[in-house]
Image (spheres, rainbow, N blue to C red):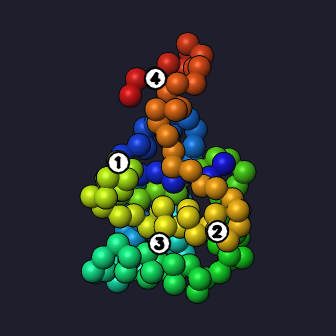
Amino acid sequence: MIYTSYYGLVNALKHYKIKMVCISAIQPSWLPWISTIKILQPPMKILDAKSVLDARKMYIEHLENIGVNDIKYELAMQGKKDFALLCYEKYSDITSGTKFCHRRFFAAWWELKTSIVIPEFDLEKMKALPVPENMAFKF
């Protein structure tokens, strides 16, 4: 399964053995070991967008220029293991309208083009799953 998420959940993603993949414009220096999909990184001009709608339009144009097949190839290169496409913004900031994030623009575009849903990694839902005692983990 492919998820989207943010760098603040690195420990939880590790715990659930979800591979982490950078798609932010700048990879965090404290995570040099994670994979990167460069074609999903937003163009730097998106940071100067005057509105969320302008940012979305710029990023969608970027994706359209790359095309579904090239993106499908890059996603397939991540292997069969579950992975999360990461950037900086907390999901609660995105849903509250405080910030916007290209990862959810990508997920919506991908679903439209392929009918494949890419959900946001839901830590609360994961914590509700039964976990063997020998794998107990505190968040």
Type of the residue with mark 3: Gln
Say if 18 sits above or below 26 in the image: above
Instruction: Read off the residue under disc 1.
Output: 92
Please tell me in which quadrant of the rendered image residue 53 appears. bottom left
Q: Picture coordinates of residue 27 (x, y %)?
A: 39, 63
Instruction: Read off the residue under disc 3.
Output: 41
Using the image as rendered, state which of residue 78 and residue 85 is in the foreground.
85
Instruction: Read off the residue under disc 4.
Output: 137
Q: Earlier in the sequence, mark 1 or mark 2?
A: 1
Do the residues under discs 3 and 1 have CB atoms within 8 angstroms? no
Q: Earlier in the sequence, mark 2 or mark 3?
A: 3
Task: Measure how far apart labels 3 and 1 are at the Cα level.
Answer: 21 Å
Instruction: Categorize mark 3 by other alpha carbons within 10 Å: few (<14), some (14-19), many (20+).
Output: many
Using the image as rendered, state which of residue 41 and residue 61 is in the foreground.
61
Instruction: Read off the residue under disc 2.
Output: 112
Which residue sits at x=59%, y=19%?
A: 130
Say if 99 sits above or below 9 in the image: below
Q: Picture coordinates of residue 83 (x, y %)?
A: 59, 50
Say if 41 sits above or below 130 in the image: below
Which residue sits at x=30%, y=76%?
A: 51
Task: Measure how far apart labels 1 and 2 are at the Cα level.
Answer: 23 Å
Q: Secondary structure at mark 2?
A: helix
Q: Secondary structure at mark 3?
A: loop
Which residue sits at x=53%, y=67%?
A: 106
Do the residues under discs 1 and 2 have CB atoms within 8 angstroms? no
